[in-house]
Image: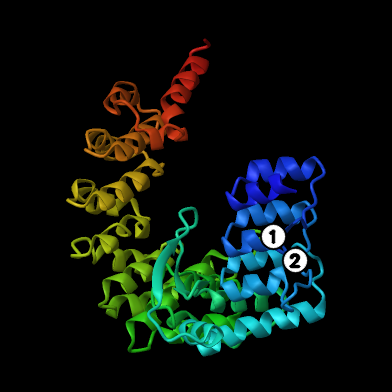
Amino acid sequence: MEELVAAVRRGDVGVVTSLLDGGADPDTLAEGLPVLCLAVAAYDIPVAEALLEGGADPLRPLPDGSTPLTRAVDGGSHLLVHALATSRTPLPAPARTDMLARARRWAEAGVESELRRITGLTGPIERTRVEDDEVGWWSEQLTLGGTTVRDEHRAILTSMEERYGIRTPFDDLVDRALAHPDRDHVVWSDVVFTLGRRLDEETWQWTRDLLNHPGRLHRLLAAEILLFLILGDFVKRSDPFWDRGRDLVPWAEQEEDPEVLAALLHAMTHDSAPEIEAVGLSHLTHPDPRVRALVPQTVHRPESLTAVLPLAHDDDPGVREAVCHWLAHHRGPEPEVGDALVALTHDERQEIRIGAVSGLAYRDDPRCVEAQHRIGPVARELRDDERLHDVWRYQRRQEAADGG
């Protein structure tokens, strides 16, 4: 059906869905291949998902012996592979074995080497950074001789192993993450998520011991995994390490790398042990704003409040925003909290002004009404911010209390 082929080519998921609902064949061929292969080649996950929901077969044998699923694995998009692999439940064992073997081959050989092997070419490779705006991950896309792949094969292997109950050794997962030494790379992130869901003492100890490594990337990876272990699994309502942030104090006290220190402080903020507050307050004047921004979250005693308030006037807007968020959620009666929020309603950044007004409203501070006018015309990207309605909610509460 030409209409479906054209819609898939241009990535029009709305038309694709409409045509499928109208009876179009989800396995319609385009140049001898099912249209699902077009979506796979274009890394078009929404269209691929629409075709799968409409009945497209991810395991359909193709003339060259591949399937849409194996093509997705070779292409290297872990989200695309997840969509195809999970559309058939359960995925047949042979397909599962082949999928894991292919991903492992790419991971072990290296994307560039494997790309050169399958193309037989030795020329320059075109490299492009591909970012997921929704999640914040990125990966590298490599093109050689008309063949394009992404370097997410280690993430495919990691996520699919976990899905099928394969407990990959801790050190192997660490090696996969460090092969892509950037905390925002999809492989690094997937390793953090995978180990962070292993809520057992063995993983906690191995991760904590990794903090002793001389390499900063090893320590950064450890700190991020520890944060996920502390947060626990909200779906299963399991958080065995919720109060273990205090265990990390010795490492935070000696850590010199600001990025690692910030990650450690973030992991520690979910514990209210007094020694954590002491570590946080010791970094009030740290030269890196990422560290200063986390100091308020380490504070739990009312008497420490005044020490944190100067950060509301920090030169870095990220620090001011973090302090504003913390003050807006502070429920203590201290009047200086309201005064600090009023001062923040004059901040140069509109998002901070919105947060400060919201905080005043939640504190039932009448100054929120006048301060609301300082927000100004709301930027397009902030118009759906629920905090913009908090003054109205405050006024409704006041009317109800007055019997109105």
Question: Depth-wise, is mark 1 or mark 2 nearer the camera?
Answer: 1
The reply, left or right, for residue 180 in relation to residue 34 is left
Q: What type is the residue that disc 1 sits on? A: Leu
Looking at the rendered structure, the number of numbered marks drawn on it comes to: 2
Residue 268 makes an appearance in the image: no
Q: Residue at x 74, y 83 (%)?
A: 97
Q: For the residue labelled by badge 2, is the local secondary structure a helix, a strand or a loop?
A: loop
Amino acid type at image mark 2: Pro
For residue 343, above or below residue 302:
above
Where's residue 390, x and y in %?
44, 29
Up the image or down, 144 lies above or below 404; here it is below
Residue 199 shown left or right of residue 61 in the figure: left
Check disc 2 and report the residue beneath it: 58
In the image shown, does 6 or 390 lie closer to the viewer? Answer: 6
Query: Badge 1 is on which residue?
Result: 36
Give the quadrant of residue 271: bottom left
Q: At which x and y percent is residue 363?
A: 40, 33
